[in-house]
Image: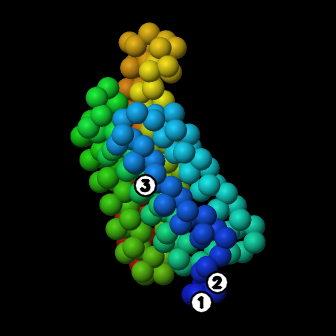
Amino acid sequence: MPDLSQERSLNVPNAITFARLLLSFVVFGLIATEKHWLWAAGLFVFAVLTDVLDGYIARRYDLITVLGRILDPFVDKFITAGVFVFLLPVAHSGVTPLMVMIVLGREMLVTSLRGVIEQQGQDFSASVSGKLKMFLQCVAATFCLLVLDRNVANLAPAADINMVRDGLLWLMVLVTVWSGWVYVRRAMVLLRSK
């Protein structure tokens, strides 16, 4: 069980995670201006990569804490779901209300299940399906941000770009639903065994 002391919780991986949370507000602000698409995409990718960094440092130097186990997945969901929410009112983003509801609904469901399962002392850490879902959400969000930039959009015919964008978004939605179902089945097995 990770140490709950304040000294141990205030470590480098948790500081990186908190910085990623602050950076997410910058990304949201850039999207809201509907002007700085390349900056928004670049900072979003940078923020996502810091997730890999803080996870590596936490495992490599045994700095895994309860705070980190709560904060890290929360920030991951906050920034990815937040990008889709902020893209929803943007014309030609490709993001629809149904997509946003599926993304948010899946995250709330899995977070609730994780709380119940781990409260009973069982492991409910991220699975391969969850990591694939996160990867596709990041790819789809980044592509949506990039193609909203006029210079990037002019690199290919609009019909082709829109087809790729929509394909990525709906693939992300399908994997998000599938991943949620994987977690539900896993939770059912764990609850029955308990």
Q: Which residue is mark 3?
A: 25
State the count of labels: 3
133 vs 189, nearest the viewer: 133
CA distance for labels 3 and 1:
29 Å
Q: Could you tell me which residue is drawn at 39 percent across and 20 percent down?
A: 162
CA distance for labels 1 and 2:
5 Å
Q: Which residue is mark 2?
A: 8
Task: Identify the element where label 1 is drawn.
Answer: loop
Q: Could you tell me which residue is drawn at 42 percent across and 43 percent down?
A: 30
- Count neighbours of disc 3 (C-alpha within 10 A) and say few if under 14, some if 14 to 19, many if 20 or more: some
- Count neighbours of disc 2 (C-alpha within 10 A) and say few if under 14, some if 14 to 19, many if 20 or more: some
Examine the rendering and report whether any part of residue 65 can be seen: yes
Q: Are marks 1 and 2 in contact (CB under 8 Å)?
A: yes
Residue 53: x, y in percent? 67, 57
Q: Could you tell me which residue is drawn at 49 percent across and 60 percent down?
A: 22
Residue 74 placement: quadrant: bottom left
Q: Say what amino acid the circle numbered 2 marks.
A: Arg
Q: Quadrant of the N terminus?
A: bottom right
CA distance for labels 2 and 3:
27 Å
Front position among marks 3 and 1: 3
Q: Quadrant of the C terminus?
A: bottom left
Examine the rendering and report whether any part of residue 136 can be seen: no
In the image, residue 90 above or below residue 135 = above
- Tell me the tag on residue 5: 1
N-terminal label among 3 and 1:
1
Q: Say what amino acid the circle numbered 3 marks.
A: Phe
Task: Identify the element where label 2 is drawn.
Answer: helix
Image side of residue 121 versus residue 61, left or right: left
